[in-house]
Image (cartoon, rainbow, N blue to C red):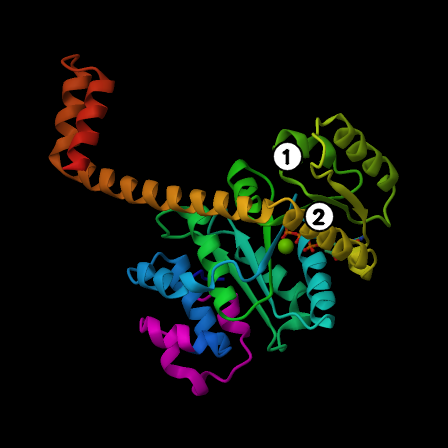
């Protein structure tokens, strides 16, 4: 699938004619007003503006700032195919049954080549495609200055503005960047499956540190007990002060909707702990700090890029290459030029 047309655009449930002007609009106040009123096309359009790093992005951010922090953000991460989308789909069902408005962001951190996988996600969450209380959106980081670490919280804010009580963020947990995105959530679920060597992978990828809840999915398969034991063993090894959160381990068979209530209960329990220990505020401040940093670094990178196109960097590079200047002094000069 072409990235220019996102899957959510294709599967929206409002007739195109009803909200035609929204599609290509950059009228931020209008879009925000419509999103506030629950127009899914305005929500989709705002997320597209965020995702593509559109020039009106600062305006979008300013308009959405007041709605920050209104939703509970739950991250789901884990190896490809472990059952994240299936679990997300079932969690949406459970949250809808409680009367919550729900947003889902399926983050595709990798290449432009995973359109098929995104479509797969979308198909597995198809159950909710016609529910006006659910927004489902796939995102990539094309074009965004600060990459996904900046785009994701902004997209979350769009969904908060649209009145979502809960936002579920699905990322494939394969690399550090994805781990960072997952750790932007209030509560992070790490999904594992029996027999995938996942427990060891989790340690390697630094996933163990970010997990608030482990879900051993595909518990219908052999080896689920061993996986639960491995994870519990690893949790037991971790040092924890008094009052610190001890990650929960939950079994599930998402494909049959089994264990979903247990996952929801573990999320609730963690939420209670966050509130009790003022951790919610701390995590959100950490998230905001990462966001500011990503935006600032992205802006710096863009300015360095423009220097590279000019003569400054080439002049410095020539000096360093012939030994007339050391690279640290050259970098200092480059930074000084950025400041001016
Ligand atoms: N046996 C079994 N299969 C499951 C279970 N949950 C999900 N699956 C299947 O596993 C496959 C992958 O599920 P997804 O939910 O797409 O997994 P994912 O982690 O979102 O995959 P990516 O987004 O591609 O990383 C699908 O064929 C599901 O039907 C389960 O509990 N047991
Ligand atoms: Mg998926």
Foreground residue, 263 or 2?
263
Foreground residue, 183 or 308?
183
The residue lying furthest to the top in this view is: 323
329 inside magenta stretch: no
Q: Is residue 146 left or right of residue 334?
A: right
Q: Quadrant of ligand 2?
A: bottom right
Mark 2 Cα shell of 10 Å, populated few (<14), some (14-19), many (≥20)? many
Q: Secondary structure at mark 1?
A: helix
Q: Secondary structure at mark 2?
A: loop
Residue in the picture at 17% in, 30% down? 336
**Res 188 seen here:** no
Q: Give residue 308's position: percent from left, percent from top.
A: 20, 36
Location of residue 150 with respect to 5 vertically, above or below: above
Query: Which residue is labeled 1 in the image?
Result: 209
Q: Give residue 270's position: percent from left, percent from top.
A: 70, 49
**Measured Cα–Cα span from mark 2 to mark 1:** 19 Å
The residue lying furthest to the bottom in this view is: 18
Q: Give residue 327's position: percent from left, percent from top.
A: 23, 19
Residue stretch rendered in magenta on the structure = 4-33
Mark 1 Cα shell of 10 Å, populated few (<14), some (14-19), many (≥20)? some
Query: Which residue is labeled 2 in the image?
Result: 82
């Amino acid at each position: 699938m072409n990235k220019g047309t996102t899957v959510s655009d294709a599967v929206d449930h409002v007739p195109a004619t009803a909200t035609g002007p929204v599609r290509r609009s950059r009228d931020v106040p209008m879009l925000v007003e419509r999103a506030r009123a629950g127009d899914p096309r305005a929500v989709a359009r705002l997320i597209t503006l965020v995702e593509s790093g559109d020039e009106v992005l600062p305006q979008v951010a300013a308009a959405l700032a007041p709605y920050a922090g209104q939703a509970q953000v739950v991250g789901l991460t884990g190896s490809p195919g472990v059952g994240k989308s299936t679990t997300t789909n079932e969690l949406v069902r459970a949250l809808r049954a409680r009367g919550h408005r729900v947003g889902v962001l399926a983050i595709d951190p990798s290449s432009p080549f995973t359109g098929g996988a995104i479509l797969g996600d979308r198909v597995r969450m198809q159950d909710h495609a016609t529910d006006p209380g659910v927004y489902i959106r796939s995102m990539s980081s094309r074009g965004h200055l600060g990459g996904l670490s900046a785009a994701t919280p902004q997209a979350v804010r769009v969904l908060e503005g649209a009145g979502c009580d809960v936002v579920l963020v699905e990322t494939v947990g394969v690399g550090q960047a994805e781990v960072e995105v997952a750790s932007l959530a209030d509560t992070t679920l790490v999904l594992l499956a029996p027999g995938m060597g996942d427990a060891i992978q989790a340690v390697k990828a630094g996933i163990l540190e970010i997990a608030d809840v482990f879900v051993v999915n595909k518990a219908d398969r052999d080896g689920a007990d061993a996986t639960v034991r491995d994870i519990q063993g690893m949790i037991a090894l971790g040092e924890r002060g008094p009052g610190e959160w001890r990650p929960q381990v939950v079994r599930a068979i998402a494909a049959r909707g089994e264990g979903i209530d247990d996952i929801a209960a573990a999320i609730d329990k963690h939420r209670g702990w966050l509130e009790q220990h003022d951790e919610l505020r701390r995590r959100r401040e950490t998230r905001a700090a990462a966001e500011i940093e990503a935006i600032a670094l992205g802006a710096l990178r863009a300015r360095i890029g423009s220097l590279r196109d000019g003569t400054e960097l080439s002049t410095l590079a020539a000096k360093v290459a012939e030994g007339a200047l050391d690279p640290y002094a050259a970098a200092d000069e480059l930074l000084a030029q950025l400041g001016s």
